[in-house]
Amino acid sequence: MAGPMPKQDSTHQDPEKPKKASKRHLALGVGTLLALIAAYVYKQGGKEELLNVIRETLLSLQSLRNYGALGWVIFVVVFIAQLTVCLPGTMVVDVALGNIYGPLSCAVLGTAASVLAKTISALVSLFLGRLFGQALGLEFPAALQRHMAAVQKRPLKALFLARLAPISTGVKNYALSLLPPEDVPLLPYTLAVLAANLIVTTGVCILGAGADNLVDALDQVMSSSH
């Protein structure tokens, strides 16, 4: 006859549960903070006011050209931060880079700075989205679904077309992180980001280089976006 079943220790807990709960709380905290920042920005004047702030910031940042390579690196880091937190004005910054670094070197310096910043931001957002996306309850946007039908058979082509989709850079960065990791292999994704950004960015930088000065370049692109 079997003896009485031993009682389980009620204090015993699955070690994975606290980790999952902590991760969920952290994700919710980050999401709440970003939502509060976005709400404050729009309360103060919305997207137009934010673009004006970006415009004034770029006018002050044009002095970075005088600092050579260090100024170029600082510009890249600032642009990475802007893209990673999904602030608008990507095209405005591209136009500024083209104008600040001049018509002769914009294809090398301005475009290189923009493409590098966008690529690094895309990879950072991929990591952050995979870390926090599910906990925040984010869903893959329907606007990108049709580009992903062949992602398992032709990942480079599918990811390249997804990167060219006419939606904001930040949305694309985080949206693709919601796919299973096997559907977004790192090397094809990086190449797709580089190729798509190179195609789009070069023309915008050249457009900015054609303006007489940075004020005219920024006013031209901002007036066309209204």
Image (cartoon, grey):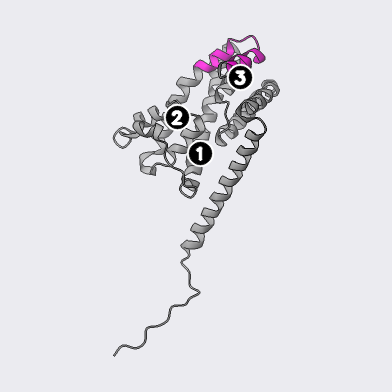
Query: Which residue is farthest bottom?
Result: 1
Few, some or many residues within 10 Å of mark 3 (<14, 14–19, 20+): many
Which SS class for mark 1? helix
Whether residues under marks 2 and 1 lie with C-beta atoms below 8 angstroms apart, the answer is: no
Few, some or many residues within 10 Å of mark 1 (<14, 14–19, 20+): many
Residue 16, label in figure:
none
Q: Distance between the residues labelled 3 and 2?
A: 21 Å
> Residue at 50% of width from left, 29% of height from top?
168
Left of 157 or right of it: where is 202? right
Tell which circle, 2 or 1, labels the residue nearer the N-terminal end. 1
The region drawn magenta spans: 203-223
Tell which circle, 1 or 3, labels the residue nearer the N-terminal end. 3
Q: Position of residue 6 (x, y in %)?
A: 40, 83
Few, some or many residues within 10 Å of mark 2 (<14, 14–19, 20+): many
Q: Name the amino acid, label 3.
A: Ala
Q: Name the amino acid, label 2.
A: Val
Tell which circle, 3 or 2, labels the residue nearer the N-terminal end. 3
Return the residue at label 3: 96
Q: How far apart are marks 1 and 3 (CA)?
A: 24 Å
Return the residue at label 2: 193
Return the residue at label 1: 125
Indicate yes or no whether the magenta region holds residue 216.
yes
> The C terminus appears in which quarter of the rendering?
top right
Q: Where is residue 152 in the image (x, y as percent from the top left)?
A: 31, 37
